[in-house]
Amino acid sequence: MAKAYSAPGKALIAGGYLVLDPAYNAYVTALSSRMHAHVEESSTRPFSSITVQSPQFDGHWDFVIHDSTIANVSETHGRKNPFLQATIKTVLNYFQPSEKFNLNITLYSDPGYHTQEKTQAKTSSNGRRTFLFHSKPIDQVAKTGMGLSAGLVSVVTGALVGHFTKQPVDQNRQIIHNIAQIAHCEAQGKIGSGFDVAAAVYGSIIYRRFTPETIDDVLGKQLSAELCAEIKRIVDSDWHFNHTQCSLPQGIRLLMGDVNGGSETPKLVSKVLAWRRASPDSAEIYAELDLANASFVSALTSLQSSIASKAALEPVIDALRRIRKGLQKLTASSGADIEPKEQTSLLDLCEKLPGCLGGVVPGAGGYDAICLLVEESKIGELKQASANDAAFANVTWLDLSEEAFGLQEEPVEDYDF
């Protein structure tokens, strides 16, 4: 029986860099562009296999499982996709299925994840889904930084867990999250903060990370029965991390702007971490940012139960300015381009646009995006004002909104193309 699943992208609004430390909370918004996976049993082969197709990018991977007790997974054509391979391996080593299986997974991604140049739109037969099909393979198409790999790992994990358990997502959400975190870190070769996977699985959340030691013992290890047992033990354990559901108040919209630039997140992060280890004043800057982030969350929470008058919006506006001030200090002290001068100028101009409460450079910062909070009733006015201003010539406002829910099951008929 076929099943379909989707998982959202993400934007880290408050908590950049602090999210790497289990001592701090971060505010993570899930986004309406989602990764999708359609899974079904395929024609019988004399061995277990999982075939993955990505028709939007003409991608095809055929994974063969060589051992029923220890999932030694290989791709028959030598095509590399570390995220798919790590996900399949981690799921199978957790479940260790005793019966042979043959699965076919078809992947789709909503338009927000990639640049939309040289694409052809195709709509499902029931008119419910429209995806962009690219003329180039996926490794040659620019990404927008919304958590593509985390969404991919999470939705494939959800599809496989759903197949092997025959249970709804909510019954296994923690297992899905834990497996996806291990697989994502395995594929990347390092333990990240995990906020992108957490948002893909849980939706918009206030997030405080798990300690890296939680999963360190199962990464980069040789396959063995002992490793499988350790994966199962860790996945089933309590990771002691925070993922409290949250959402933007009614009448407030997230507006993402794709800026014609580019940043290398790993280099930015490495630079900040090196500075933090060497700098005695880093604790003071982190404490200042943490207070600003906490005031931002508190202001949004207060808005949930009040009318969004100008006075009620002031604490949100003030908190966003304090977050920016902290990130500017972090930029100056660490030497990393978290809020570079070009983005400072752009965000200062954004604050003058109709309905804009303020904005930040999301996530690790850099040159490639800005994120604004805007009064919903003034979105059109803001876009028109920016269209008439040459200073915004390199900004493309993305057709995205906040997504409260994380991984979820979808109607199978929506994926008939």
Image (tube, helix red, strand yellow):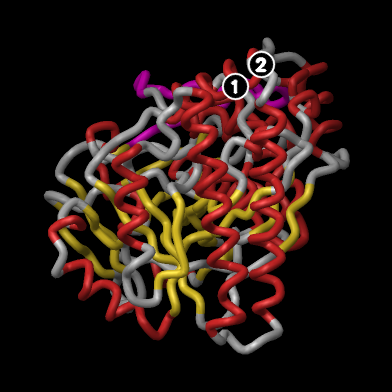
Res 334 seen here: yes
Q: Which of 301 and 320 is in front in this view?
A: 320
Describe residue 235's horizontal placement relative to residue 132 as left or right.
right
Describe residue 124's horizontal placement relative to residue 186 as left or right.
left
Q: Nearer the viewer, residue 298 or 80?
A: 298
Residue 77 on the magenta segment: yes
Looking at this rendering, what residue extends furthest in the top direction? 222
Considering the numbered disc 1 on the image, is that residue within a helix, a strand or a loop?
helix
Q: Which of the 4 image quarters holds residue 408?
A: bottom right
| Residue located 53% across and 66% down the image | 317
| Residue located 56% across and 19% down the image | 189
Describe residue 115's horizontal placement relative to residue 197 as left or right.
left
Residue 213 on the magenta segment: no
Q: Quadrant of the N terminus?
A: bottom right
Q: Name the residue carrying label 2.
A: 277
Is 236 placed above or below 86 here? below
Q: Which of the 4 image quarters holds residue 173?
A: bottom right
- Residue 88 image offset from top left, x and y in percent: 57, 34
Label 1 sits on what residue type? Answer: Leu
- Residue 324 image offset from top left, x and y in percent: 50, 48
Residue 273: image tag = 1
Describe residue 46's horizontal placement relative to residue 296 as left or right.
left
Write down the region rendered in magenta: 60-79
Label 2 sits on what residue type? Answer: Arg
- Residue 251 image offset from top left, x and y in percent: 51, 82
| Residue located 39% across and 76% down the image | 355
Is 23 placed above or below 68 here? below
Considering the numbered disc 2 on the image, is that residue within a helix, a strand or a loop?
helix
Q: Quadrant of the C terminus?
A: bottom left
